[in-house]
Image (tube, grey):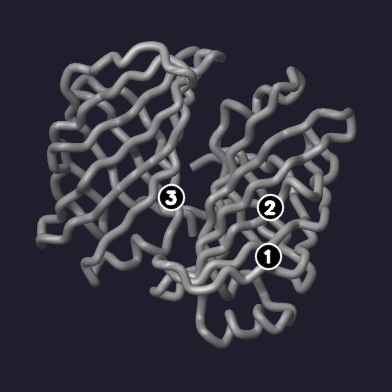
Amino acid sequence: MKTQLLMTLQVTVAPALTVGDVPFGTRRTAPLAGGTFEGPRLRGTVVPGSSADWLLLRRDGVLELDLRCTLRTDDGALISMQSFGLRHGPPDVIAALARGEAVDPATYYFRTMPRFATGHPAYEFLNRIVAVATGDRRADGPIYTIHEVL
Amino acid sequence: MATTIASRPLMVLRLATSTPEAIGPTPHGALTIVPVTGGTFEGDRLRGTVLGGGGDWVTTRADGILALDLRVTLQTDDGGVIHMTFSGIRDAATQYFRTAPRFETAAPQYAFLNRLLAVGIGEIGPDGPVHTIEEIL
């Protein structure tokens, strides 16, 4: 599979809202307080207020991530991004992540499939691609390395 | 930080389809439902047949791109049943045809499918759509 780097997205997560036990697992909502993204073709900031990650800890221990965020490029375009992701790993690694410790991202699975939508002509190519991201959960929020699937 | 995305082959999925049903223009675009009547899938870790009753809900967007929304049921050669969905993009102008498959199963030997993300490279073969699906490592 051929890919090329689209951007690195670093987000800052605000304290999560715990919705609690729902029929499919345990649900939390983590609003994004902000963030930045940078790649060869686009760069800018995450717009707080319209960005959050809807988290569902499934009964099989896998965390489903449903991120929706708005990106503002340095030349003023707004880009809507949505990604579905999965995060899981050995219990001790997941526990260390929950404590906010620095953990080697190679020790757990954290992958997402971002999709983009924009009305800005300079970034229309984003409407036409499938992308894959690897995640690295840091104490203040994840860093996503996002690749375009070629 | 990963500079490449590692993947490995999961399966090649060949779909048999029947005459599409054109729903027509909807608020999101022209919707066409392509029934999936059967097919096969084959990979190192699983193989079997596609059961009838699935389909691909294809919306032609205002920019000409086809937005794909597929649901099918896979049955493995050892009796496992797998619910598979994908969303995807098909651009007839560039032949870009990529999907993001997801799987759900209760069969213990295929539980790994519940925990992975995947990418499909699609093409239209002489006998119907063929999706070469890679697991994202």
Where does the image place residue A98, in percent across and percent down from the top left? 65, 80
Mark 2 nearby-residue class (10 Å; few <14, some 14–19, many ≥20):
many
Where does the image place residue B70, in percent across and percent down from the top left? 33, 36
Looking at the image, tell me whether mark 1 or mark 2 is earlier in sequence order: 1
Please give the name of the residue rendered at 22% of the width and 33% of the height, measured from the top-left corner. B15
Q: Is residue A9 left or right of residue B88?
A: right
Residue B94 visible in the displayed image = no
Circle 2 chain: A
Q: Is residue B137 left or right of residue A12?
A: left
Q: Nearer the viewer, residue A28 or B131?
A: A28
Measure how far apart labels 1 and 2 are at the Cα level: 8 Å
Residue type for callout 3 = Ala
Please give the name of the residue rendered at 22% of the width and 19% of the height, measured from the top-left corner. B126
Would you name the residue on which mark 2 appears?
Answer: A145
Q: Is residue B118 left or right of residue B16?
A: right
Where does the image place residue B117, in percent across and percent down from the top left? 45, 54
Quarter in which the N terminus of chain B is drawn:
bottom right
Q: Nearer the viewer, residue B30 or A116?
A: B30
Measure how far apart labels 3 and 2 are at the Cα level: 16 Å
Residue type for callout 2 = Thr
Name the secondary structure under disc 2: strand
Cβ–Cβ under 8 Å for marks 1 and 3: no
Would you name the residue on which mark 1 appears?
Answer: A136
Circle 3 chain: B
- The image quadrant of residue A61 is bottom left
**In the rendered image, residues at marks 1 and 3 fall on the same chain:** no
Cβ–Cβ under 8 Å for marks 1 and 2: yes
Would you name the residue on which mark 3 appears?
Answer: B118
Name the secondary structure under disc 1: strand
Please give the name of the residue rendered at 64% of the width and 47% of the height, measured from the top-left corner. A68
Q: Is residue B82 above or below residue A40?
A: below
